[in-house]
Amino acid sequence: MKFEDRLNSLGLNLPDATVPAGNYVPFVQAGDMVYISGQISNGPDGLVIGKLGDNMDVETGAAAARLCGLHLIAQLKAACGGDLSRLVRVVKLVGFVNSTDSFTDQPKVINGASDLMVAVFGDAGCHARAAVSSPSLPLGVAVEVEGTFQIK
């Protein structure tokens, strides 16, 4: 099944690839690798703002990470000239979770992005990963995820 078909079968629509809010680019291609800048939890209803362990639960945080994953895929599609079939594999995700000092379920939150990559890309979506706590994130968002992808 083509990756675009998988997105459709999952009932997912990719957002538009967002433009940077600062002095950086949304992605850099070096050889067959694409490095995508951190994508924040931004959905159809706006930013998902909150702090895990304070005013947000793990399930809501995982949904926010899934939104970050959708934005990563949108940036990947832009990097591939609109052709997601160029993906060879998702290499690594790094997830940042806006969380309290006592919150320790960052991996469960970032599973929202990881599970999305596997659902959309199958075996090519299996990746290395880091899931870390952050005392705050830009604009107060709950989650930010960056990614490294190999393309052909």
Image (cartoon, grey):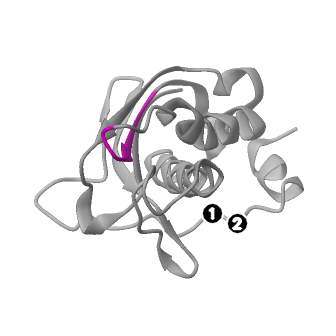
Q: Amino acid at mark 1?
A: Leu
Instruction: Kindly report the distance in space between the C-alpha atoms of the residues bearing marks 2 and 1.
Output: 4 Å
Principal SS element in the magenta part? strand
Crowd band around label 2 with a 10 angstrom C-alpha radius: few (<14), some (14–19), many (20+)? few
> In front: 7, or 83?
7
Q: Position of residue 70 (x, y in %)?
A: 58, 54
User: Is 100 contained in the magenta span?
Assistant: yes
Q: Secondary structure at mark 2?
A: loop
Crowd band around label 1 with a 10 angstrom C-alpha radius: few (<14), some (14–19), many (20+)? some
Q: Position of residue 30 (x, y in %)?
A: 29, 27
Q: Position of 125 compared to 148: left or right?
A: right
The relative height of residue 94 versus residue 19 in the rendered view (above or below) is above
Q: Amino acid at mark 2?
A: Asn
The relative height of residue 146 versus residue 149 in the rendered view (above or below) is below
Residue highlighted by disc 2: 13
Residue highlighted by disc 1: 14
The relative height of residue 21 versus residue 45 in the rendered view (above or below) is above
Q: Secondary structure at mark 1?
A: loop
> In front: 21, or 145?
145
Q: Determine the residue positioned at 62% across, 43% down.
A: 112
The relative height of residue 101 versus residue 57 in the rendered view (above or below) is above
Q: Position of residue 20 (x, y in %)?
A: 25, 64
User: Is 32 contained in the magenta span?
Assistant: no
> In front: 56, or 62?
56
The part of the chain drawn in magenta is 93-101
Report the label total: 2
Dot 2 and dot 1 residues touching (CB under 8 Å): yes
Give the position of the N terminus as an image quadrant. Answer: top right
Residue 88: quadrant of the picture = top right
Q: Determine the residue positioned at 77% across, 28% down.
A: 122
> In front: 102, or 36?
102
Q: Most extreme residue toward the bottom, as rendered?
A: 45
